[in-house]
Amino acid sequence: MKIVFDDKLVAPCGINCGICQAYLRKNNPCHGCNYAEQNRPKTREHCGLRICTKRKDKFCYSCDEFPCDRLKHLDKRYRTRYGISEIDNLICIRDKGIKSFIEEESKRWISDEGILCVHDKKYYEIIGR
């Protein structure tokens, strides 16, 4: 069975929740930032970027303030710690479309070993989701 990411796993800030440790863990997994009705860690439930009302569409790039200070701060942390950029992800989604972004993410993070977690650099197998 080939694993592919669901476009609904891409958060408004451009993070692919499918590579997050909270999503990949077996016990009490987060279902992603776009699934408010599902169990989700409080940090995601109250995330200012997720609940921001300044966006004109689903993603932060649709905001007149893109990239805002909050997004820049998150982007700097993820670039430094994990080597990825939410801002670059959002530009890719804006310019190439979500389907192209998902295809690129699948090539980058999914292999025969499973899904590579951005946080702990371990491979995870997703069963029953």
Image (tube, grey):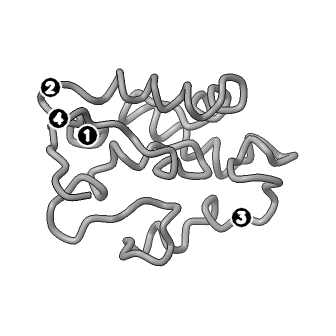
Work out how far the residue at label 4 is from the one at label 1, CA to CA, in angstroms. Answer: 9 Å
User: For residue 28, which numbered disc appears in the image?
Assistant: none
Q: Residue at x 52, y 62 (%)?
A: 34
Q: Residue at x 45, y 26 (%)?
A: 103
Q: From the image, tell me which residue sits under label 3.
A: 52
Coordinates of residue 119 in the picture (x, y in percent): 28, 42
Q: From the image, tell me which residue sits under label 4.
A: 114
Q: Are marks 1 and 3 in contact (CB under 8 Å)?
A: no
Q: Is residue 43 above or below residue 15?
A: below
Secondary element at tag 1: loop
Coordinates of residue 44 in the picture (x, y in percent): 47, 66
Q: Nearer the viewer, mark 2 or mark 3?
A: 2
Which amino acid does the dot numbered 1 rest on?
Answer: Cys
Q: Quadrant where the C terminus lies? A: bottom left
Mark 4 or mark 3: name the one nearer the start of the chain: 3
Q: Is residue 53 above or below residue 39?
A: above
Q: From the image, tell me which residue sits under label 2.
A: 112
Work out how far the residue at label 2 is from the one at label 1, CA to CA, in angstroms. Answer: 14 Å
Q: From the image, tell me which residue sits under label 1.
A: 117
